[in-house]
Amino acid sequence: MKKVLHKNSKPHKILDAVLISGGILVISLVSPLSGALLTKSLIKLYFKKKKFIKEKFLRDLKRLQERKLADYRVLSDGKIKVVLTQRGKEKLLVYDFDKLNIKRSQWDGKWRLIVFDVPDYQKRARDALREKLKNLDFYQIQKSVYITPYQCENEIDFICSVFDLDRNHVLIFETSKFEGEEKLKHYFRL
């Protein structure tokens, strides 16, 4: 039976905290609420009736270690050093991808036209890119041409890295005007 790491589960939050801290996190078991706010919010998940449930925390760490998502060891001073593995980073990358969205800030008057010509040997990645752009509420003009009024270069870079697409096959053009833009202003409620 394949073990699933559920989003927002305690083990997932441990991985998130380790990733945010730069891949290594040291937590004191003697005084678990001392330290950074990030650590405090993570450790508070393991408190019950104002008592730190150390066994549950260690059990979740052990599960992450068994699945090769994180590695940990108890140091001589009573602290635990948690290190995110490459596999753990990849797992979190997938979750970040699922949470990806385009920030809908004040429109700057520019349109971003995303045009891609992905080779046939990467058909699955091309189809996944197309689906992700639709999910992010890009407007499809043609099969491989999408448009949005919002800045999206970082998000497109991230999507390309997840699907292992050569960024040269996915282009972003900026324009301030084009024929038929009134329809899209209405679509995007601008």
Image (cartoon, rainbow, N blue to C red):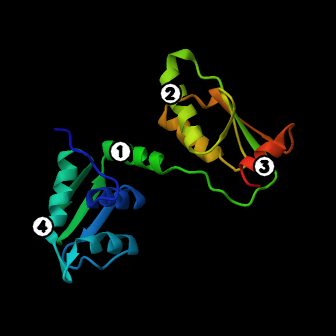
Q: Amino acid at mark 2?
A: Ala
Q: What x and y, as percent, mark residue 19?
A: 39, 56
Q: Are marks 1 and 4 in contact (CB under 8 Å)?
A: no
User: Which residue has dot 2 on it?
Assistant: 125
Q: Amino acid at mark 1?
A: Lys
Measure how far apart labels 3 and 2 are at the Cα level.
30 Å
Q: Which badge, 3 or 1, comes first in the chain's sequence?
A: 1
Rendered residue at 58%/45% (across/down) = 136
Residue 36 left/right relative to 58? right
Q: Which badge, 1 or 4, comes first in the chain's sequence?
A: 4
Is residue 75 among the parts visible in the rendering?
no
User: At numbered mark 2, what does the secondary structure look like: helix, strand or loop?
Assistant: helix
Residue 190 location, quadrant = bottom right
User: At numbered mark 3, what does the secondary structure look like: helix, strand or loop?
Assistant: helix
Rendered residue at 57%/32% (across/down) = 130
Measure how far apart labels 2 and 1 are at the Cα level.
18 Å
In the rendered image, the residue lying farthest to the top is 120
Residue 117 location, quadrant = top right
177 up-or-down from 51: above or below: above
User: Which residue has dot 1 on it?
Assistant: 91
Q: Which mark is residue 185?
A: 3
User: At numbered mark 1, what does the secondary structure look like: helix, strand or loop?
Assistant: helix
Q: Residues within 10 Å of mark 4 (few under 14, many from 20)?
A: few
In the rendered image, the residue lying farthest to the left is 55
Q: Amino acid at mark 3?
A: Lys
Q: Amino acid at mark 4?
A: Glu
Between marks 2 and 4 in the image, the one whose residue lies nearer the viewer: 2
Q: Which badge, 2 or 4, comes first in the chain's sequence?
A: 4
